[in-house]
């Protein structure tokens, strides 16, 4: 068996539970936006890079309202999130020349939500052949990009679309 190491995740693995919702903590601390890789925020929601992305450029749009229920979200909030998702897709296509984009929500832990208590919309840029043997056989991903650079590029492209 081959072992792959990801030492940069040790703080997450050793991390203490904060006792609260991670998305609410981001929502309530705009002074930490750069550190937490927030791309955008307004009175309804914010956009933030996924801390453990599936692909480089993977980000989420999250309402400030803490809810696990899409149906409880005011319609105008959902419409605003959908509008920002359109802008996000355009930004990913323009800046990253992505072939496709996956957009989705996992509503509830049975649906695969890692943070089920607070709804969030994922945007994942995808390219032809972006999976290979290491993903299929080794159940691992390799990124050959700098995440700080990706953050800056996604943020600039997203803000340009607004």
Image (cartoon, rainbow, N blue to C red):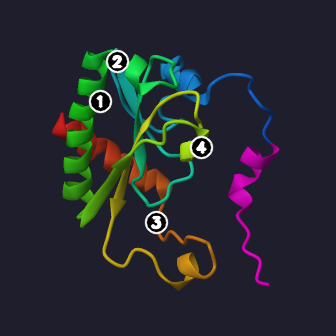
Q: Is residue 130 left or right of residue 117?
A: left
Question: N-terminal of the two: label 4 or label 2?
Answer: 2
Do the CB atoms of the residues marked 4 and 2 lie less than 8 Å apart? no
Helix, strand or loop for disc 1: helix
Cα gap from disc 3 to disc 1, whole angstroms: 28 Å
Q: Position of residue 83 (x, y in %)?
A: 21, 32
The residue sitting at 36% across, 79% down in the picture is 129
Do the CB atoms of the residues marked 3 and 1 lie less than 8 Å apart? no
Instruction: Answer whether residue 98 is visible to the viewer in this image.
Output: no
Residue 116 lies in quadrant: top right
Q: For the residues carrying marks 3 and 2, which lies nearer the camera in this image?
A: 2
Q: Position of residue 96 (x, y in %)?
A: 27, 61
Helix, strand or loop for disc 4: helix
Q: For the residues carrying marks 3 and 1, which lies nearer the camera in this image?
A: 1
Q: Which residue is mark 1?
A: 81
Which residues are drawn in magenta? 1-14
Helix, strand or loop for disc 2: loop
Marking on residue 145: 3
The residue sitting at 33% across, 15% down in the picture is 74
Question: N-terminal of the two: label 1 or label 4?
Answer: 1
10 Å crowding of disc 3: few (<14), some (14-19), many (20+):
few
10 Å crowding of disc 4: few (<14), some (14-19), many (20+):
few
Instruction: Answer whether residue 87 is visible to the viewer in this image.
Output: yes
Question: N-terminal of the two: label 3 or label 2?
Answer: 2
């Amino acid at each position: 068996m081959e072992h792959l190491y990801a030492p940069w995740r040790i703080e997450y693995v050793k991390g203490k539970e904060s006792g609260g919702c991670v998305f609410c903590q981001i929502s309530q601390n705009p002074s930490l936006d750069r550190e937490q890789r927030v791309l955008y925020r307004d009175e309804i929601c914010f956009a933030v890079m996924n801390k453990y992305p599936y692909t480089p450029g993977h980000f989420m749009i999250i309402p400030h309202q803490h809810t696990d229920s899409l149906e409880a979200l005011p319609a105008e909030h959902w419409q605003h999130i959908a509008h920002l998702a359109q802008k996000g897709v355009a930004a990913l296509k323009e800046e990253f020349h992505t072939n496709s984009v996956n957009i989705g929500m996992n509503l509830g832990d049975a649906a695969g939500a890692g943070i089920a208590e607070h709804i969030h919309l994922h945007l994942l840029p995808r390219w032809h052949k972006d999976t290979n043997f290491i993903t299929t056989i080794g159940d691992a991903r390799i990124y050959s990009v700098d995440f700080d650079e990706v953050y800056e590029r996604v943020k600039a492209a997203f803000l340009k679309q607004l």
